[in-house]
Image: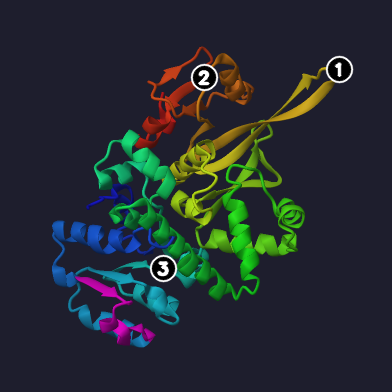
Amino acid sequence: MLIKRDFYLQQLIDGKQNGLIKIVTGIRRCGKSYLLFKLFKQHLLQSGVEFDHIIEIALDDIENRTLREPLALYHHIKQRIADKDLYYILLDEVQLVPHFEEVLNSLLHLANADVYVTGSNSKFLSSDIVTEFRGRGDQIHLFPLSLAEFCEGTQQKPEDAWPDYYTFGGLPQVLSLKTDQKKLDYLSHLFESVYLKDIVERHRVKQTAELEELVRVMASAIGAPLNPTRLENTFKSVKRVNIDSSTINKYIGYMQDAFIVEKAVRYDVKGKKHIGSLAKYYFSDLGLRNAILGLRQQEESHIMENIIYNELRRRGCKVDVGMVSHREVDANGKWMRKQLEVDFVVNDGNRMCYIQSALEMPDAEKRQQETNSLMRIKDAFQKIIVVKGNIKPWRDENGILTISLLQFLMDPKSHHLQ
């Protein structure tokens, strides 16, 4: 099974010899080592780089155990640099080296060394590593497989792959498992023994049961506006658990640092500013989310929204949740102020678009509901409705584009269709 992952490989290629440490981050088991040590190394060799000018060290290999000492690793690398030609240094699981930051900083001083690193836990499971090397590091953030990559790995058509994809997600190992039960067992075990364990150990979390329950609550609420206070009230009234909003906020931060969830904040489209404390949280991998819930709550509309969000983020877009305020007359003839939601306000460089996710639009009433907020946005940016049905793209008299979900996910430029 070969999945090219060209989108990320090109980022590594574009970063060659830029004087920065290339830091491959991402949720655990999403394919970081495969990208660097299989695909990128293959590119280097095919580009004419000599084999002995690629210094590849897997620090989790027992043969390299002695290299987990900082000075030993640094001296080993320097000894292998035998001439003034360029050397590519590929380090896997570098977090196993104490004070690895000092090693990497020292390698930056070598004029003929181009450094690439990955890691799977501790600081590398978190955004800390990016902060540590701000100005000296070039982050390549790896997401689980997109639908297009999933189809490449399974050799399936998108319509055939979709049920498995939205149920079991895009962690590459899932593709090699033959039965639904094995996939579910793998994902459940991965979450409990790896992701949750790393958070608990790294942050010395004492209320582990409360942390687990918070993850389950957030998994069941994808697509719903949340904040720590609202979650605290949910715990008290429904779960009969006493956990305060400050602790909830801290735990959510741990989940974000570990790339388990991402936060989409609310954006006032007319006022052009971020507003309020409510936000939406989307899971980086839907298979993990579904396994956490034991494959319950399989609402395809919410899962579809999460997958669209992930696809936009994978494309490098900044994504907010849009709010459009307007005034209308109520049943009693009084003016009232209402807020309408735009699922996604998408910024891609100097381009912008607005996207609504709709599982289906069977009639004019449903279409009006989905277009209501878009119609009240008066700028000229692209406005898109993504629907699950198998339709050809079409644009109505107001310029709103309607496109099928599968075409949207399979075409990396679909959010810029003109």
- According to the picture, the residue beneath numbered tag 3 turns out to be 120
Q: Quadrant of residue 324?
A: top right
Segment tinted magenta in the rendering = 54-70
Residue at (47% x, 29% y) in the render = 386
- According to the picture, the residue beneath numbered tag 1 turns out to be 332
Is residue 135 among what the camera can see?
A: no
- Kind of residue at disc 1: Asn
Point out the frontmost of discs 3 and 2: 2
- Report how far apart the C-alphas of labels 1 and 2 lie in the structure: 31 Å
Quick one: 379 or 413, which is closer to the camera?
413
Q: Is residue 273 above or below residue 54?
A: above
Q: Secondary structure at mark 2?
A: loop
In the rendered view, does 82 fall on the left or right side of 123? left
Residue at (51% x, 71% y) in the render = 197
* Mark 2 crowdedness (10 Å alpha carbons): few <14, some 14-19, many ≥20: few
Q: Secondary structure at mark 1?
A: loop
- Report how far apart the C-alphas of labels 1 and 3 lie in the structure: 59 Å
- Quadrant for the C terminus, please: top left
- According to the picture, the residue beneath numbered tag 2 turns out to be 362
Quick one: 331 or 36, which is closer to the camera?
331
- Report how far apart the C-alphas of labels 3 and 2 lie in the structure: 45 Å
Label whose residue precedes the other's in the sequence (1 or 2): 1
Point out the frontmost of discs 1 and 2: 2
